[in-house]
């Protein structure tokens, strides 16, 4: 099963905010499963044989209140991707948290809403443009998931951890917080492991959070987050020096690599890397109108 697990679900149509296509609602899920986002695949903007530089994005109409999620598949150029994320380091997240995320294979960038089209062009376009409207996402929603059959090793905080029979998931929740100065959107992103999740005949149990690879951000109006997976700079095969050394051993992949990259042996003819854009919207009524300037009080030039 591919990285798209949790996005392509049975659905019925609801009404979307201005600028978005009709938004599907997810059918009831098994006990213990988080609510996946309501995916919208825009015809003509998914599975394109050539990358799309200009795509349809959610539009801030001044009344929509909540969180939108956009998923791209960009050409897998590590240098271009890592450089862009490094040059757009998030200001809403503590730098120590950003470093911790990178250690766990997750890169995060912060940008303005009107910079999103330029970001896509810088990354070389996308082979897919999947949009979802979550609204006030006070419950956890699934951004992506990796079903695990048998056992799988991963690296968490620099140490190897073995997961068995379950589902590794990246969850999101976010909501508008009115403040005296206006409003912000509080976002939480958290990797979790769900033992027994999606295993036939097994009952889902409580999710096991991995908080050291998660983040919290309080975004002001007009700001968005971008997330992808990337191997840490320190990830290198072990040395073969010494009389008792064996062949080079590649360490297990980190959480971010498992959830937000594609394996090198993927059957896709074009190497691609998932990028998730999280776009909060706060309605205009949360903000006081700009004070009018009385021209009669202006000093002459």
Image: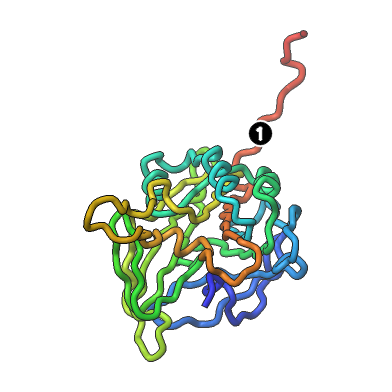
Q: Is residue 119 visible?
A: yes
- Up/down of 66 relative to 30, above or below: above
Q: Position of residue 114 (x, y in %)?
A: 68, 44
Tell me what residue is drawn at x 48 percent, y 38 percent: 91
Q: Is residue 183 visible?
A: no
Tell me the element at label 1: loop
Tell me what residue is drawn at x 40 percent, y 81 percent: 31
Tell me what residue is drawn at x 54 percent, y 74 percent: 2
Which residue is outermost to the top? Answer: 301
Which residue is outermost to the left? Answer: 244
Residue at mark 1: 290
Which residue is outermost to the bottom? Answer: 201
Q: Nearer the viewer, residue 226 or 147?
A: 147
Q: Position of residue 296 (x, y in %)?
A: 76, 17
Tell me what residue is drawn at x 32 percent, y 71 percent: 163
Q: Does 186 sit left or right of 76 as displayed?
A: left
Which residue is outermost to the front? Answer: 243
Q: Does 255 sit left or right of 298 as displayed?
A: left
Q: Position of residue 165 (x, y in %)?
A: 35, 79
- Up/down of 289 relative to 145, above or below: above
Q: Position of residue 214 (x, y in %)?
A: 39, 55
| Residue 58 quadrant | bottom right
| Residue 189 quadrant | bottom left
Tally the numbered discs.
1
Q: Residues within 10 Å of mark 1 (few under 14, many from 20)?
A: few
- Up/down of 266 relative to 69, above or below: below
Q: How is the image coloured?
A: rainbow
Q: Does 102 sit left or right of 27 as displayed?
A: left
- Figure quadrant of the C terminus: top right
């Amino acid at each position: 099963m591919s990285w798209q697990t949790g996005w392509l679900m049975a659905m019925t149509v609801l009404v979307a905010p201005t600028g978005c296509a009709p938004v599907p609602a997810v059918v009831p899920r098994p006990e213990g499963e988080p609510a996946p986002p309501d995916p919208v695949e825009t015809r003509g903007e998914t599975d394109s044989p050539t990358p799309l530089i200009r795509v349809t994005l959610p539009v801030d109409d001044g009344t929509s209140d909540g969180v939108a999620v956009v998923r791209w598949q960009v050409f897998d150029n590590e240098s271009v991707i890592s450089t862009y994320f490094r040059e757009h380091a998030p200001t809403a997240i503590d730098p120590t948290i950003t470093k911790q995320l990178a250690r766990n294979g997750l890169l995060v960038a912060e940008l303005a809403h009107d910079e999103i089209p330029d970001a896509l062009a810088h990354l070389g376009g996308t082979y897919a443009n999947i949009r979802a409207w979550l609204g006030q996402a006070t419950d956890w929603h699934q951004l992506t998931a990796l079903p695990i059959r048998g056992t799988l090793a991963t690296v968490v905080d620099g140490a190897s951890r073995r997961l068995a029979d379950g589902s590794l998931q990246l969850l999101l929740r976010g909501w508008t917080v009115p403040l005296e100065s206006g409003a912000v959107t509080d976002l939480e992103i958290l990797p979790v492991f769900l033992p027994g999740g999606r295993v036939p005949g097994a009952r889902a149990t409580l999710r096991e959070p991995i908080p050291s690879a998660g983040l919290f951000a309080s975004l002001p109006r007009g700001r968005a987050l971008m997330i992808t997976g990337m191997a840490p700079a320190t990830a290198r095969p072990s040395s073969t020096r010494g009389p008792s050394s064996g062949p080079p051993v590649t360490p297990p992949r980190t959480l971010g690599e498992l959830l937000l990259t594609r394996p090198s042996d993927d059957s896709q003819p074009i190497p691609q890397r998932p990028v998730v854009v999280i776009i909060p919207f706060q309605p205009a009524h949360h903000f006081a109108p700009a004070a009018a300037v009385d021209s009669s009080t202006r000093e002459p030039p």
